């Protein structure tokens, strides 16, 4: 039975993807800092779907600490085996104003979680997958990684880095039969977006996102914006000359800072 390893499985997109893969007959290994949230979701879900309890493994870890995620991966390898798919999905989105000293610390946390946390999630599986000759590594990026948005410097920079990190890795691993898939969600209704104070075009449910993500992973798509209308926006954003981009964004509301929650 196939196995998927998902970080950020205690909420939002990670949880919706876990459910979609369980319904498809896979085993799922879930990671997050809140182990209690993972455990209660897992026990409810096995009851609801009438599954044997060994279909879900839960591991508490903080992706900001390579040793912590490495330990979770080792536990998963020992108890459940080598995954077919690894999804580095754990992420945080906090607005920053880098003229404020404290926001430098916020920016570091965003980079550590969204960029280094992604590399640390893939790390423990790469050599074993290369030896086996197949496997998919899925990086959860964002449309926000395509251009820099006001107030969103930390998040946009982290997601731009995630996109290029995955692109580098794709080139490195292609010859050994591994796929690296970058998913770039637009707006998905999860706890991460619920406090946003600006319009969120093409907002979709986490379940609808998970269904489309699963299709992209199945196909081994290199880079996929979800939903597709946001893909058109992303293409336009990429091509827009800086002078036009600046004008479009002028006066638009900025992402609020972490302390303004
Ligand atoms: N929602 C959107 O519109 C949207 C758009 C573009 C991209 N994304 C990306 O999609 C991914 C999932 O976001 P979401 O919307 O589902 O957000 P969410 O509901 O807030 O879930 C984030 C998940 O990441 C986990 N997490 C955060 N920091 C972690 C850490 N240091 N170590 C381990 N786990 C950690 C959280 O669990 P714990 O708190 O229990 O650790 C939670 O399970 C993120 O990478 C996000 O940037 C989302």
Image: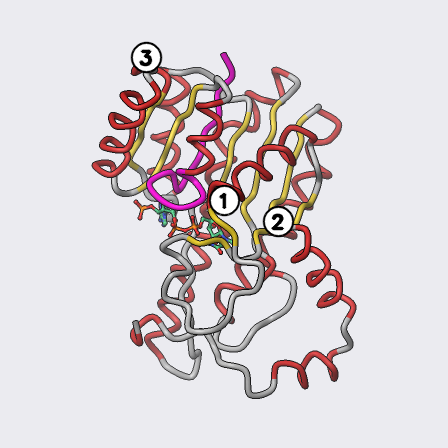
**Left or right of 97 on screen, residue 84:** right
Range of magenta residues: 1-15
What residue is rendered at 74% in x and 84% in y? 243
Nearer the observer, disc 1 or disc 3? 3
What residue is rendered at 38% in x and 59% in y? 109
| Residue 169 position in % (x across, y down) | 65, 40
* Picture layout, residue 65 above or below residue 94: above
What residue is rendered at 53% in x and 44% in y? 209
The Cα–Cα distance between marks 2 and 1, rounded to whole angstroms, is 19 Å
- The dot on residue 52 is 3
Nearer the observer, disc 2 or disc 1? 2
The Cα–Cα distance between marks 1 and 3, rounded to whole angstroms, is 30 Å
User: Residues at badges 2 and 1 in contact (C-beta under 8 Å)?
Assistant: no
| Residue 167 position in % (x across, y down) | 68, 46
Q: What kind of colouring is applied to the model shown?
A: secondary structure
Q: Residues within 10 Å of mark 2 (few under 14, many from 20)?
A: many
Residue 227 belongs to the span the image colors magenta: no
**Left or right of 150 on screen, residue 239:** right
What residue is rendered at 57% in x and 52% in y? 185
Question: Which quadrant of the view contains residue 110?
Answer: bottom left
Which SS class for mark 2?
A: strand
- The dot on residue 226 is 2
In terms of sequence position, does the residue under pointer 1 or pointer 3 come before the other?
Answer: 3
């Amino acid at each position: 039975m196939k196995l998927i390893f998902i970080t950020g499985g205690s909420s939002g997109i990670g949880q919706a993807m876990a459910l979609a893969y369980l319904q498809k007959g896979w085993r799922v290994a879930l990671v997050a800092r809140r182990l209690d949230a993972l455990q209660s979701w897992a026990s409810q879900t096995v009851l609801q779907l009438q599954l044997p309890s060994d279909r879900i493994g839960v591991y508490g870890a903080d992706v900001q600490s390579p040793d912590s995620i490495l330990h979770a991966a080792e536990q998963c390898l020992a108890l459940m085996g080598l995954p077919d798919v690894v999804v580095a999905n754990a992420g945080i989105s906090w607005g920053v104003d880098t003229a404020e000293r404290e926001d430098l610390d916020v920016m570091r946390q965003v980079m550590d979680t969204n960029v280094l946390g992604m590399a640390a999630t893939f790390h423990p599986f790469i050599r074993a997958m290369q030896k086996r000759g197949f496997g998919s590594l899925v990086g959860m990026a964002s449309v926000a990684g395509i251009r820099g948005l006001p107030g969103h410097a930390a998040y946009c920079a982290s997601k731009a880095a995630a996109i290029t990190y995955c692109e580098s890795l794709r080139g490195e691993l292609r010859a050994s039969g591994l796929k690296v898939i970058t998913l770039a969600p637009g707006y998905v209704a999860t706890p991460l977006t619920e406090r946003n104070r600006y319009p969120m075009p093409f907002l979709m449910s986490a379940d609808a996102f998970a269904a489309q993500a699963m299709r992209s992973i199945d196909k081994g798509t290199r880079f996929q914006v979800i939903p597709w209308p946001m893909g058109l926006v992303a293409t336009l954003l990429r091509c827009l000359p800086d002078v036009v981009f600046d004008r479009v964004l002028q006066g638009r509301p900025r992402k609020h800072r972490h302390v303004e929650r």
